[in-house]
Amino acid sequence: MSHYNFKKITVVPSGKDFVDIVLSRTQRKTPTVIHKHYKISRIRNFYMRKVRYTQQNFHDKLSEIIGDFPKLGDIHPFYADLMNVLYDKDHYKLALGQINTARHLIDNVSKDYVRLLKYADSLYRCKQLKKAALGRMCTIMKRQNQSLEYLEQVRQHLSRLPTIDPNTRTLLICGFPNVGKSSFINKITRADVEVQPYAFTTKSLFVGHTDYKYLRWQVVDTPGILDHSLEERNTIEMQAITALAHLRAAVLYIMDVSQQCGHTIEEQIALFKNIQPLFANKPLMVVVNKIDVMRPDELQEEEKKLLADFDSEGIPVLPMSTVTEEGVINVKTEACDRLLAHRVEGKIKGKKVNDVLNRLHVAVPQQRDTKARPPCIPEGVKKRKTAMEVDGKRKKLERDIEIEMEDEYVLDLQKNFMVPEEEKYDVIPELWQGHNIMDFVDPDIEKKLDELEKEEGLKEAAGEYDEDMSSEDEEMHEIRKMAAKIRDKRQLKMMESKEKRKVEKPRLPRTALRGKRSRFESEMGELGVEPDQGGHYTRSRSRSKSVVVNKRQRTDSVGRAVSSSRTPRDVSGVRDKPMRDKAKKLMKTSQRRANRFGKIGEADRNIRTAMPRHLYAGKRKMGKMDRR
C-alpha cells in the first residue's frame, strides 16, 4: 500500500483514561436499578448484561486501535523501513501484540464470569461477581499503560509525517549538511523549509510539489548525511538513507564548491562514492551549488579533475546558485527530463508494452504525386477573418453617431428593424394579457352606437318611459309601511338594550320580569295588532309541584336517635347578633380576592414559589430544558 493516511488513526488514551471511558459508558448505557425481590433470572441477566457490555466496549476500542495502526508487512517497504528507523519495529510490534493479548484476556474474563453468573443464587453474589469481573478487566488495561502511551506517541509522530507517494514522479535531494538542499526545494516548489547557516537544520523528510509539462512532480528534501559507516549513522541520517533505498526517483547530489559547509570537495566526493550503491537504476545528477561565491573554473586543478571524473562516468554536472537563482530552472528541467526518459524506457522494457503495441497501429501517409494541393478556404471564412482584423475599416457605431450629433442626437432603434422600409415606423400594437387589443375592437362600433341612440330617442318621444310601471296595490303599500315601523322599533329596542348593558347591574332573564298589561297592549297597538280583551297576558307560567323528600333521621355511630336541634356551625361560638354580623363581614372580606379571579378558591392548587427548588436545583445533564 503506497498511500496510507496516518492522520486518521484514532487517539490512544492512557490506561486510566481507557478504564474511565469504558466504565462511564457502561454506567450510562445499561440499566442501573435492581431490587432483591426480583426474580433471580432477572437479577442474573441484569449483571450479565453489564459484564458483557463492558467486555464488548473494551473489545471494540482495542480492535479499532489494532486495526488503525499500519501493519509493517502490508505497507510499502519505504514506510516499513522509515517506521523501523523512527520507532524500532520490534518495540512497535511488541506494543501491538500486548494490546492484542489484553483483548483476548478481557474476552476470556468475560466468558468465565458470565458462566459463573448463570449459577449465582442471590443479588449479593451476582453483584460481587460483576464487581470482580469488571475489576479484573480494569486491572488488565491498567497494566497496558506503557504500551498505550508508546502507541499514542507513535500516532502523534505518524500524523506529522509528510505524505510521500513512493510510485509517483519524484526528485530526491541529498548531500552533506548545509550545502543548499532546503534552499533549492524552496525555490522550485511551494514548500517552506527552514534554512539556517548551521548543519542539520533539516531533521526529517520534507515534501514539496512542482509542475512540469502539465504533470505534478514530488520533490523530497532529505536531512544531511555524513561520511561514516552505516552502523554509526543516527536516526536523522537514516531517514535519508531509507528514502534513497526505496524511492524510485531522480537523485540530485548537491555539492558546495565554496566549501562553506565545512567539508572539502574531496570529502563530498568520498561521501558520493560511499552511498553510490543506493543510486543504482536511478537517474543521477551532480549539482554544484553556491557558484555565486566561487565558480567551478576558479577551483584548483586537482578539484577540477575530480569533477571531470563525473563526466567521464556519464554523470552530468550542473552549476547552480540558489541565492541568485542562476541555473535553478535548468537543473529542475534537466532532472525532470531524465526521469521521464528513464520511466518511459522502463515501461518499454516491461512485458506489458508488447500487449499495448499489438493493439496500436500508426499509419504514416505516403506522397501520391507531385501535384500541389493548397488548402481550400471558403469565401465566407475569408470575409469573416477580414472583418475581425483591427486595422481594417470599422463599422460606425451608435456611440460614434451620438458624439458627432451632440445635442441633436435622438436614439432611433426602429431604423435597424429587419422589416420592409415602409413598415419600420408603424404603430406598435398594444398587448393585454397576451392578446392584441386591436383584435377585440369592432370597426363598426360608432355606427351601431348612433343607431342605438336614435332608437332610444324614438322611444322617449313615444312616451314609453312615462308610464308608472308599479303594479303594487293598496294592501301592499300598507304591508311595506308596517314593515318599516317594525324595523324602526327593532332598531330602537336594540339601542335601548345596548344602553342598559353599559350599567353593571345584576341581570335577570326576561322570564323573571313581570310584564304590565298596559305596556303590552300599547306596544301591540303601535304595531297594528289588537289583543283580545279577556286574554291573560300577565300570568306567569305555572310551576309543577315539587317532590317533597322526607328527611332521614339523624343517628349517632351506635344508631341512637340524635336531636336535630343542634346549633348551626356559623352561629356556634358567637356571643350575639353584632358579633355574628362582624364575623360574616370578615368572611366576605377574606373571600374578596378569590372572588375576583372567579374560579380560584382555597382548595385550588397554588405554587407560591416562582422557581421551585426540585425543578431548578442541581447540575443539568444532556437533554432538553423545556421540562424545567
Image (cartoon, rainbow, N blue to C red):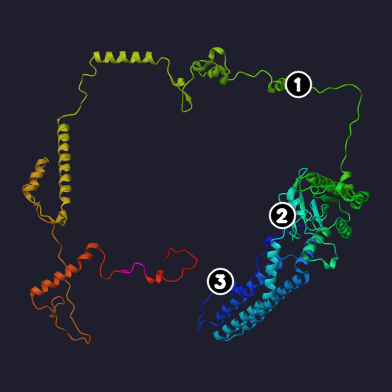
Q: Residues within 10 Å of mark 1 (few under 14, many from 20)?
A: few
**Residue 456 or 390: which is nearer the viewer?**
390
Residue where numbered disc 3 is placed: 29
Give the label on residue 244, or none: none
Q: Return the disc, 2 or 3, that comes first in the chain's sequence.
A: 3
State which tag comes first along the sequence, 1 or 2.
2
Q: CA distance from mark 1 to mark 2?
A: 59 Å
Q: Are marks 1 and 2 in contact (CB under 8 Å)?
A: no
Residue, disc 1: 378
Disc 3 packing (10 Å; few <14; some 14–19; many ≥20): few
Query: Please, what is the dominant secondary structure of the magenta stretch?
Result: loop
Q: Is residue 38 left or right of residue 306?
A: left
- Give the Cα separation between the discs numbered 2 and 3: 49 Å
Magenta region? 606-611
Q: Which residue is mark 2?
A: 193
Task: Report the amino acid beneath label 3.
Answer: Lys
- Can you give x and y, in whole percent of width and height, for residue 106 in the image? 67, 77
Indicate the secondary structure of the residue bearing disc 2. loop
Q: Quadrant of residue 277?
A: bottom right
46 sits left or right of 186 in the view: left
